Image (cartoon, rainbow, N blue to C red):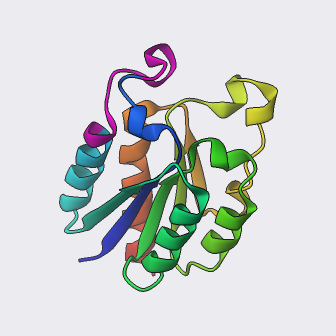
Amino acid sequence: MAIIALLHGPNLNLLGQREPHIYGSATIDDYVAAVAAAAAQHGHTVEAFQSNHEGALVDAIHEARGSAAAIIINPGAFTHYAWAIHDALAAFDGPIIEVHISNPNAREPWRHTSVVAPVATGSITGLGMHGYELAVQAVVRRLAAA
């Protein structure tokens, strides 16, 4: 049984309220519950964390180094410029799946660059809740192969 760290960046605490035409009506609690249920099917647990502060997410990534086997992260807007998150993830020794509810490449041009993708095992975008479930499947396969 492994722990999967599920990390959410800025404004994702407003899921279900913020721009529902882009992000849908599911709340962050709905996303956490879906990931926890998917992980539990494979005997894994989830530790979820959300912050609107870059340093807090860096701290959570550092803490995951000692406790989690994998990270699923939706960095929110930090995706596009947070080199400190990039560097913290680069120091994590395990699968890292970057996930986004919407497809950043189908949105404003400034969203097209991810500084997280180069250190992620893989990225899943534009599939909403299903993308998070796929992220769990990817983690499970990577952990089984290790």
138 and 22: which is toward the camera? 22
Residue 49 location (% of width, % of height)? 38, 58
Residue that protrudes farthest toward the top in the picture: 21
Q: Is residue 80 left or right of residue 125?
A: right
Between 17 and 139, the residue placed more toward the observer is: 17
Residue nearest the observer in this picture, 12 or 36: 12
User: Residue 130, how many percent across, how many down?
Assistant: 38, 36
Please name the residue shown 22% across and 64% down the image.
42
Residue located at (45% from left, 23% from top): 18
The magenta stretch spans residue 9: no
Quarter containing the N terminus: bottom left
Q: Please tell me whether residue 81 is drawn above or below residue 100 in the rendered image.
A: below
Q: Residue at x 40, y 39 (%)?
A: 13
Is 76 above or below relative to 20?
below
Q: Is residue 78 above or below residue 28?
A: below
Decide whether residue 19 is among the magenta residues: yes
Is residue 7 rendered to the left or right of residue 91?
left
- Counting the numbered discs, the total is 0
Camera-nearest residue between 55 and 67: 55
Where are the magenta residues, as a range?
18-30
